[in-house]
Amino acid sequence: MRFYSCLGAFVSLALAGAAGAQEQGLELKDLVAEALRNNPEILASQKRYEAARQRPSQAASLPDPTLSLGYSANGNPLPGTGLGTQPTSNIGFSFTQEFPYPGKLRLRGEISSKEADAELAQYTLVERNVILRLTQAFYRLQHTYPAQEVLDRNHALLETLLRIIEARYAAGQGSQQEAFKTQTELSVLETKRIQLERERRTREAEINSLLNRPAGTAVGQPVEPHVHEIAMTLDEIKARGLDAAPELRRDQKMVERSELSLNLARKEVYPDYALTGGYYYMGGMPPMYQVRADIKLPLYFGRKQHAGVAEQWQTLAEARHAYAAAGQSIGFRIEDAYLAAQSSYQLLNLYLNTVIPQAHLALQSSLTAYQTGTADFLSVFTNHIMVVDYEMNYHEEMLNFHLAVSRLEELTGLDLTKEGQR
């Protein structure tokens, strides 16, 4: 009687679905909003961009003028000596304003503007990188809950199996080997539970770190994510992603900056100049006025300006190669993440609609046969382990799908987690 009671409990546990989901409230969008407000990396990058925005007006402005005050004396160095009697004695002042050759200031302002645009793209890149790490930590944390549920259910099933074995052994129908095998599997489950607990604590600590929260702050249980097939084709994602990728925008701005720097280096052969105007008091004699132009002569073009042009040529070539390399890298990473997401989505459907139901049917059939004495315990045990393994694989592929989609979203800036992305 005890044997059939235990067997009935085992059948009930083996065929029951997961227990009703606990109340869940941790939303990814709330974590993302908090990260945008509080993450130190994002805030630091934002301030770098805001600082860079102040440079164009500085670079495009004229140098500050120079005010010169002085006197000339005859007979002794005291001010005013010889005023009105000596034509070279005077007291006065002058203003000097430097002027770069026409076009240089404009180019310097445009170069600084391109640098600010590159900082904006870098700021966007930092935001996306932080959001990617936060999103992946969220999904990894969420994965621990259904995985823990599978392990808990498996643990209960194995304990029921152990009671069945003990009942059969007491009736002279079982063996100690079956009990040892079941106890070993229970120990293996305990190691997996410890690993899951460590993973959960690690992801909670990572989320708190990314949100700039105090260590040990309670995180909560994430809501269960939905799975939707990616509606866009790989070519569509690549086309839109390469246009919107902040890494490419940053490198493109650096190419444009290098082109402007090359033009500026070419203009260095043209001289800068300074204009000076002064007024000098002569005592009783008529005042003296001075106007002067100072022009820099590029006598060392071969040693200085020519080398500057050659340097900017190489810098431009480097920027163009970096841009091409970034495009190739992003294209590959988009394709890799897309194929990973598609593969995981297909495996999810296969596990959910075919593999797991068939494994449950095999388990139910072996249980029925075991109850009538036409199947041995090993087949029941093996079928049960297969069911658990397939359910764990299902949740692993669920995690892999969301990790791949989050990488795609980070690379392209597209929202692929909603239905109807077209």
Image (tube, helix red, strand yellow):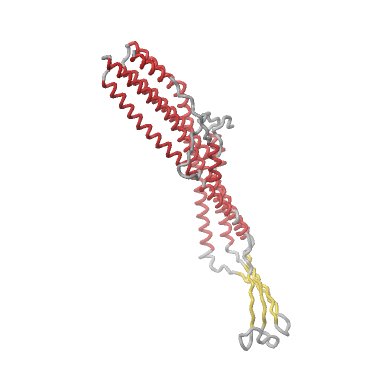
Q: Is residue 207 left or right of residue 386?
A: right
- What residue sits 37% from the left and 13% below the top? 368
In this view, the residue farthest toward the front is 2
Residue at x 50% of width, y 48% of height: 322
What residue is rendered at 27% in x and 16% in y?
Answer: 170
Residue 19 coordinates in the image, percent (x, y): 46, 24
Quadrant of the rendered structure where residue 3 is? top left
Q: Quadrant of the C terminus?
A: top right
Q: Is residue 191 left or right of residue 348?
A: left
Residue 247 appears in view: no
Relative placement, left or right, of 126 versus 380 is right
The quarter of the rendered structure image containing the N terminus is: top left
Is 171 displayed left or right of 314 in the figure?
left
Number of numbered markers = 0
The location of residue 17, given as percent across then percent down, is: 45, 22
Image position, residue 145 (x, y; %): 45, 31
Observer-nearest residue: 257 or 70? 70
Q: Give 76 or 307, whichever is nearer the viewer.
A: 76
Note whether 114 is above or below 274 in the view shown.
above
Locate residue 47, reporting x and y percent: 56, 52
Query: Residue at position x 47%, y 21% from top?
Result: 353
Q: Nearer the viewer, residue 343 or 353?
A: 353
Query: Can the viewer see residue 121?
Result: yes
